[in-house]
Amino acid sequence: MFWKKKNIGTIYSPCVGQVLNLSEVPDAVFSEKMLGDGACIVPESDEIFSPVDGEIVQVFDTKHAYSIRSSDGLEILVHIGLNTVELKGEGFTSLVSQGDKVKIGDKIAKVNLEYVQDMGYQLYTPILITNMSEVKKINVTEKKVNVNDILFTYNK
Amino acid sequence: MKEFSYIIKDKVGIHARPAGLLVKEASKYNSDITIMTKGKSADAKKLFAVMSLSAKTDDEVRISIFGEDEIVAEQGLRRFFEKNL
């Protein structure tokens, strides 16, 4: 039997929440996959965990977005909330720095979900593979997940 | 080779959204496109690289374009920066 096992990978959920296809995100930059392909989660827990094993490439000054290079070379963007760059870091606490090595399930950020919503921002959190040429297909199942459950899988 | 400079006016700089739009615009052209600021440079067709520049309001960025379609690329990118950043 010939198994092409290495060609399938998994991105794990960074929080408790509802998984959605990117097409459901009410923001064209994500729904039209301009930044990358993946899935979206609507967080129900205020702690955000790494969805992959890898290295933190960038913590945005505004602490709402995290770039992570996975150990298998994928460039993953975790973008917490829509337009939350405008909050200028308020409501977000970063627990990692550029260059940190992270494992699936390591805590990377805390978000005050209530504050972000009270300020009028939506919590849709896209988790994207930004170097899309590395992957052929993304498989998303829309359902409620816990931290470290499968968020989506991809075929290389 | 074509080059131009631009001072970022966007109030939050080149964050995820404009970086994505910039990569999309740059990827329309065959030329090699490099964006430089504060001693760092990035391939304008690579999102991670562009975001890592952390270009902010009032930062000067320099764009250099090299390749067969550099003339149209320069026009397109100048328009892009004026409109979006």
Image (spheres, rainbow, N blue to C red):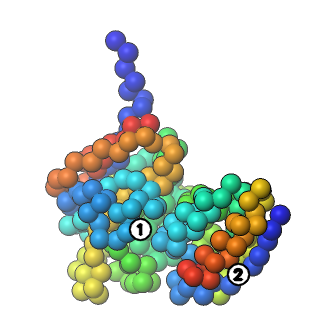
Amino acid of disc 1: Val
Q: Position of residue A155 (x, y in %)?
A: 39, 37
Judge whether residue A87 can be spotted in this image: yes
Q: Are marks 2 and 1 in contact (CB under 8 Å)?
A: no
Callout 2: SS:
strand
Q: Is residue A126 left or right of residue B16?
A: left
Residue under label 2, please give it. B6
Q: Position of residue A97 (x, y in %)?
A: 51, 65
Q: Is residue B83 above or below residue B19?
A: below
| Nearer the observer, B9 or A28 | A28
Quarter residue B47 falls in = bottom right
Residue under label 1, please give it. A29
| Nearer the observer, A96 or B19 | B19
Quarter residue A92 falls in = bottom left
Q: Chain of mark 2?
A: B
Q: Are marks 2 and 1 on the same chain?
A: no
Q: Position of residue B21 (x, y in %)?
A: 52, 69
Q: Position of residue A63 (x, y in %)?
A: 44, 73
Q: Residue furthest left?
A: A144
Q: Is residue B36 left or right of residue A135?
A: right
Image point 38% across, 78% down: which residue?
A84
Image point 52% across, 83% down: which residue?
B12
Amino acid of disc 2: Tyr
Image point 60% across, 58% down: which residue?
B27
* Mark 1 closeness class: few <14, some 14–19, many ≥20 residues within 10 Å: some
* Mark 2 closeness class: few <14, some 14–19, many ≥20 residues within 10 Å: some
